[in-house]
Amino acid sequence: TGMHSGANLMGWTAPEADIFAAEARRCGVPQELITVESRSANTGENIRFSCELLEAEAEPIRTLIVVQKPFMTRRAYATFRKQWPTQPAPDIATSCEALSFDEYAKVVAMERSDIISIMVGDLQRMTVYAAPPTEYQVPQHVPPFVEHAGNLLIQLGY
């Protein structure tokens, strides 16, 4: 199933990497096909540490599928493009479960306001993390109407 990040935003008592690996095993994925990266504290670290683990145990990686929250696939792609340490970087596809906002809120059992705050933060990072001095990810176009909506949500306290 590939890598699972060690970051934890859900208040779990174990790293999300361990929780997702347990879920993969529960769904029938053999243990020998699961690699857990549990040192990372953010997306960039997860990409760099995952690269180290994958290169240590496999042939050169040519293609990867990054599975992420529905609202974070673009930022995951942009971060991957910047943070993958070896060149040439593999081809990347991003994937997420196609859920409406309400469906997602039920699945993750989070308050709508918390999800909106996380989404607004990810939207801000699309711009901030692509600019100096951080440059954690490659630039991504954010349509003006999306930027405007994000600014309105910030004004509302999100």
Image: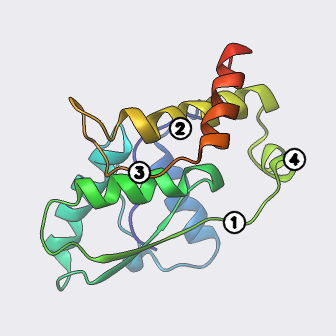
Q: Residues within 10 Å of mark 3 (few under 14, many from 20)?
A: many
114 horizontally vs 78: left or right: right
Give residue 119's position: percent from left, percent from top. Answer: 63, 37
Q: Residues within 10 Å of mark 2 (few under 14, many from 20)?
A: some
Q: Label 4 belongs to which residue?
A: 102
Q: Label 1 belongs to which residue?
A: 97
Question: In the image, what residue occupies the spot 53% across and 38% down?
Answer: 122
Mark 4 or mark 2, earlier in chain: 4
Amino acid type at mark 1: Glu
Circle number at residue 5: 3
Estimate the spatial distance between the alpha carbons at disc 1 and disc 3, rounded to whole Å. Answer: 18 Å
Picture layout, residue 118 above or below residue 60: above
Amino acid type at mark 3: Ser
Foreground: 133 or 37? 133
Picture layout, residue 22 above or below residue 135: below
Picture layout, residue 158 above or below residue 136: above
155 horizontally vs 107: left or right: left
Label 1, secondary structure: give it. Answer: loop
Question: In the image, what residue occupies the spot 63% across and 25% down?
Answer: 151
Amino acid type at mark 4: Asp
Give residue 110's position: percent from left, percent from top. Answer: 76, 34
Label 4, secondary structure: give it. Answer: helix
Label 2, secondary structure: give it. Answer: helix
Give residue 117's position: percent from left, percent from top. Answer: 66, 27
Q: Label 2 belongs to which residue?
A: 122
103 horizontally vs 73: left or right: right
Amino acid type at mark 2: Asp
Question: In the image, what residue occupies the spot 55% across and 60% down?
Answer: 22
- Between circles 1 and 3, the one closer to the viewer is 1
CB within 8 Å, label 3 to label 2: no
